[in-house]
Amino acid sequence: MADPMTPVRYRVAAKHQETSDTWTLDLRPLAGPIATPRPGQFTMLYAFGRGEIPISVSGLPGEGSPLRHTIRAVGSVSEALCALVPGDEVGVRGPFGTSWGLERAEGRDVVMMAGGIGLAPLRPAVEHVLEHRDSYGRFAVLIGCRTPRDLLFLRQLEAWRGRFDVEVEVTVDSADPGWHGDVGVVTGLLPRIPIDPDNITVMMCGPEVMMRFGARAMIERGVAEADIELSTERNMKCAIGHCGHCQLGPKFICMDGPVFPLPEVGPLLAVRSL
Amino acid sequence: MTEVVAQRQSIRDLLAAHPFFADLGDRDLDLIAGCGQNRVFRPGQVLFREGDPADWFHVIRRGRIALGISIPGREDLIIDTLGPGEVLGWSWLFPPHVWTMDATALDTVHVIALDGVCLRGKCDDDPALGYSLARRFAGILSDRLASTRLRLLDIYQADPHG
């Protein structure tokens, strides 16, 4: 197994601008690739000379597809990564962490709730369910973001919405009059989704406040906490549970997470000092 | 006369099937239905504007409605959308009975429009009905307040790590 602390060199094969501050990078290995990530896992991306940050995988490599990461330029390293152009090199370590419980969800209804950039770690899970559609029951994807201009993966959203076997609902916090979609919080979409509490798996990724309200709404509709998974985010550094930067109580987000069943992490998220 | 009764009965059934009126007693449903009528709005049609008298409220059966605010010097802003199963408007219930936002049909909208003046009169005559309705509207107010608070947090704002 490769040294988890040594970055593998990748080249930026393509770059797509998603929003005013968010880009998706398509990466291809210069030599051997990293192990194939599972949906929900993250890698450490190294902008040479600038630093390294954890970024969730937004597209799985395979059969000609590149390794994809969707990055919001919010700090020094993410700005450097978003400034890369095709042909530039980047270091990749990983994949790290836990993944969405897609196997456990087989045979059940699945609801995925994404807020803002949180759609990126869920996208491979959405694609997995769509590629194995017969293995799952009803499938709904609920997406919330700030404005219509902040929506990620527009072309893919259109493709998903064009299918008859998935319900895709999008809402924004506010919009100009040209917007004909929904306006409101993402949890406001939940009443539209039929919920069978005994046969459902819920996967959420987004701001913690959104996940807290989303989980509460699901529990009010009878969904068991154990059937709700959250993807959490902390300041991962080493990604192998040594440095402690991402510690959340007794958990290391980099190893025990980022995807957790709600009972494991819910009480910790409610602790104010954590 | 028959036509009016038939329509009233139909409205009563529609109200009974609407989540907002779930578990409401037959007598109360009859009273409320007496203040109602079916209405259809075309896409883009304005239901009301800020400052208009709030004489009606709308029980949405089909279609979606945008709630917007006009801001001088810039484009109007849509701050909420409502759809089937929801109710538009509580200003009819509280003085000064004036709408505080604009409401526009986003697509073809089917509603039961309930006459607020008629209903206020019935609520004054029958406090139990008034209490039941007030409780339901308080639930909506509570949900919308929670939603507004959540949006005030601007939760999708970038976290300046990395």
Image (spheres, rainbow, N blue to C red):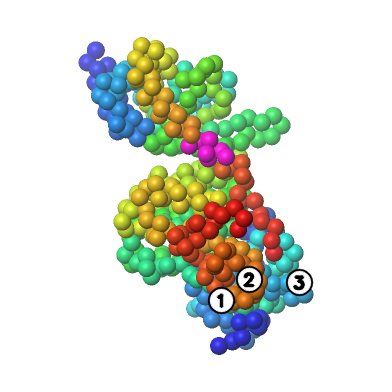
Q: Which residue is mark 2?
A: A244
Neighbour class for label 1 at 10 Å: few (<14), some, many (≥20)? many
Instruction: Say whether residue A82 is left or right of residue B146.
Output: right
Label 1 marks a residue whose chain is A
Q: Mark on residue A95?
A: 1
Say if A175 sits above or below B136 in the image. Answer: below
Residue under disc 3 on the same chain as residue under disc 1: yes
Q: Counting residues from the N terminus, which is met first, the one under dot 2 or under dot 3?
A: 3
Q: Counting residues from the N terminus, which is met first, the one under dot 1 or under dot 2?
A: 1
Q: Counting residues from the N terminus, which is met first, the one under dot 3 or under dot 1?
A: 3
Residue closer to the observer: A185 or B67: A185
Viewer-side label of 1, 2: 2
The amino acid on which the numbered mark 3 sits, given as a three-letter code, is Arg
**Magenta-colored span:** B143-149
Residue plotted at (35% across, 67% down): A106
Residue under disc 1 on the same chain as residue under disc 2: yes
CA–CA distance between discs 1 and 2?
A: 18 Å
Q: Main secondary structure of the magenta part?
A: helix
Label 2 marks a residue whose chain is A
Question: Please, which residue is most extreme toward the right here?
Answer: A49
Magenta stretch encompasses residue A153: no
Q: Is residue A25 visible?
A: no
The amino acid on which the numbered mark 1 sits, given as a three-letter code, is Pro
Magenta stretch encompasses residue B144: yes
Percent across and percent down for residue A271 are 56, 54
Residue plotted at (70% across, 57% down): B160
CA–CA distance between discs 2 and 3?
A: 21 Å
